[in-house]
Amino acid sequence: MKGFKIASPDTGLFTSEQTLDKDGKFEGYESRCVRRKDLLETIVKELPLGTIRYSSKVAAINELSRFKLVHLADRSIIKTKVLIGCDGVNSVVAKWLGLETPVSVGRSAIRGLVEFPDGSGFDPMFHVNFGGGVWFGFLPVDEKTVYWFCTFTPSQVPTCQGVRCGCSSHFS
């Protein structure tokens, strides 16, 4: 990723561009979008067979010299030098690291990947458009794959207040 392209909330057209190295602070800096599957496959190839455990609920973590003792919910204990925690919002790993408890920011999000068999043609820039409480953006992962997202603040469900709107409360 080389920078950002920002769209106007009024027109939807990209009106400004910001490179990551605009003032020399990020010289040599590189940012990439990586598929989780590709990252996991790369890690698996580099580690001895059987060193990765999936779907294992971490119950507690203790230190033993240079090692960590990872206590799992099934009562097994793993002695390890490296622990990659992907245990969700109530993470035992995050608590052990001393990270703050997550808080709700009141926004919802959807995201995904789209494949362009003939190439997307997008610059390696983070494209973003926001306005009216909605943020939409996309970032090329590679020549043919684009990561996209949309975040928003869910609105209150409107009430009918006596207006015939098609909901079942108006029919007898």
Image (cartoon, helix red, strand yellow):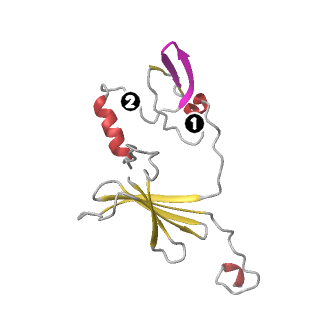
Q: Give the residue drawn at x 28%, y 59%.
A: 144
Relative vertical location of residue 85 with respect to residue 153 in this rendering, above or below: above
Asked whether 61 falls inside the magenta stretch, the response is yes
Q: Residue furthest bottom?
A: 164
The residue labelled by disc 2 is 52
Stretch of the chain drawn in magenta: 58-71
Q: Give the residue drawn at x 51%, y 72%.
A: 8
Element under disc 2 = loop
Q: Give the residue drawn at x 65%, y 39%.
A: 101
Q: Give the residue drawn at x 56%, y 66%.
A: 134
Question: Residue 31 or 69: which is nearer the viewer?
Answer: 31
Question: Residue 8 or 65: which is nearer the viewer?
Answer: 8
Residue 116 drawn at (x, y percent): 29, 63
Residue 103 drawn at (x, y percent): 66, 47
Which of the 4 image quadrants contains residue 97? top right
Q: Alpha carbon of mark 2 to alpha carbon of mark 1: how far?
A: 18 Å
| Left or right of residue 60, residue 56 in this image | left
Give amino acid for label 2.
Answer: Ile
Q: Are marks 2 and 1 in contact (CB under 8 Å)?
A: no
Element under disc 1 = loop
Residue 77 drawn at (x, y percent): 49, 20
